[in-house]
Image (spheres, helix red, strand yellow):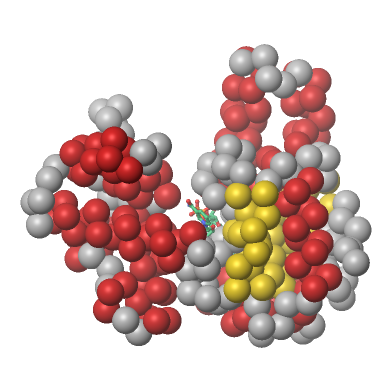
Amino acid sequence: MTKQIATIGVVGAGTMGAGIAQVAARAGFDVVLVDQAETWLDRGLATITENLDRQVEKGRLADTARDAILARIEGSIQIPHLSGCELVIEAVTESFATKSDVFREVADVTAPGTIIASNTSSISISALAATVPDPARVAGMHFFNPVPVLTLVEVVRGLQTSDETVATIREVAAKMGKTPVEAKDAPGFVANRILMPMINEAVSCLDEGVATAEDIDTVLRLGAAHPMGPLTLADLIGLDVCLSIMEVLHYDFGDDKYRPAPLLRRMVAAGRLGRKSGRGFLDYAKGG
Ligand SMILES: NC(=O)c1ccc[n+]([C@@H]2O[C@H](COP(=O)([O-])OP(=O)(O)OC[C@H]3O[C@@H](n4cnc5c(N)ncnc54)[C@H](O)[C@@H]3O)[C@@H](O)[C@H]2O)c1
């Protein structure tokens, strides 16, 4: 059995939240997109408009359809505006403290039984679920970046998650044109447990001078048929996000094979976060 979903709330209008709001509205859901401040919200709404405008320019979307999609998205900086949602997807900063605060606030303002999903890359869904009454309605709904392009959604089942919650999230993901794949609530789920240690090892190769950043990327592109090299991918994901995922893997497994590369820590400390800050392993200010 699944729960009927008409209105989806998205908390966090950053890289992921804006993408999730866009695909949800395009799939016909009404969307309430909430961020903590007008500047972040406006940036997220502007990204959605730019993405849809590009689709119109390329002839992939009628301008009337774009207008209809945008009309289905309501922006807000007030969590109480989520009160009418049947499903709320949290996509705020990767921090347990921040996410659990949002979970509690969402649970306070929504009807009992409202499904609360997290887009977390690595935080335990069972631990997030434990912060709200009725944890059976909590699951992971892990989208991939860029959300409008990549078609995978990892559906993460916490210890407390009900079958109805999992089935509903699978159904919503499919309506959004995504392929849902179920994973247990283990550190990093499937994708990041495999992907992040590879990125981390590429950073160590760079730090040890094994090869240049460009050559490390070329090796994986041409030698392993990856569509982009691991350092370019790390820049796209955000080096702060990569570091926090490695920290969770390291802490949760207690195994030094997941130790974050020292250069990854230095890059984040220096504010070189990748594309979003203009510089990471590659320099985007120069169009690199
Ligand atoms: N970037 C990726 O490639 C990627 C991929 C998959 C999953 N994720 C996960 O998605 C989540 C968001 O990542 P992102 O890259 O979009 O981050 P981001 O930094 O681009 O956006 C986070 C947004 O959350 C907002 N926010 C923070 N605290 C808030 C609060 N209390 N209430 C409302 N809004 C708040 C911020 O203002 C910001 O706009 C993280 O959990 C991350 O691990 C990221």
Comparing 288 with 206, the one in front is 206
Give the side of residue 75 with respect to residue 119, left or right: right
Up/down of 140 relative to 15, above or below: below
Comparing 149 with 112, the one in front is 149
Up/down of 65 relative to 45, above or below: above
Q: For the point 35% across and 77% down, which residue is it? A: 250
Percent coordinates x, y for residue 185 in the rendering: 58, 75
Tell me the quarter of the picture where residue 149 sits: top right
Q: In which quarter of the image is the N terminus?
A: bottom right
Percent coordinates x, y for residue 125 in the rendering: 61, 75
Q: For the point 60% across and 68% down, which residue is it? A: 183
Tell me the quarter of the picture where residue 71 sits: top right
Q: For the point 40% across and 74% down, which residue is it? A: 249
Q: For the point 31% across and 55% down, which residue is it? A: 199
Percent coordinates x, y for residue 194 in the rendering: 41, 62
Give the side of residue 201 with respect to residue 92, left or right: left
Give the side of residue 113 with respect to residue 74, left or right: right
Comparing 65 with 254, the one in front is 254
Percent coordinates x, y for residue 158 in the rendering: 65, 77
Residue 35 in view: no
Residue 224 in view: yes
- How many labels were placed on the picture? 0
Up/down of 160 relative to 288, above or below: below
Up/down of 223 relative to 248, above or below: above
Tell me the quarter of the picture where residue 288 sits: top left
Residue furthest to the left in view is 209
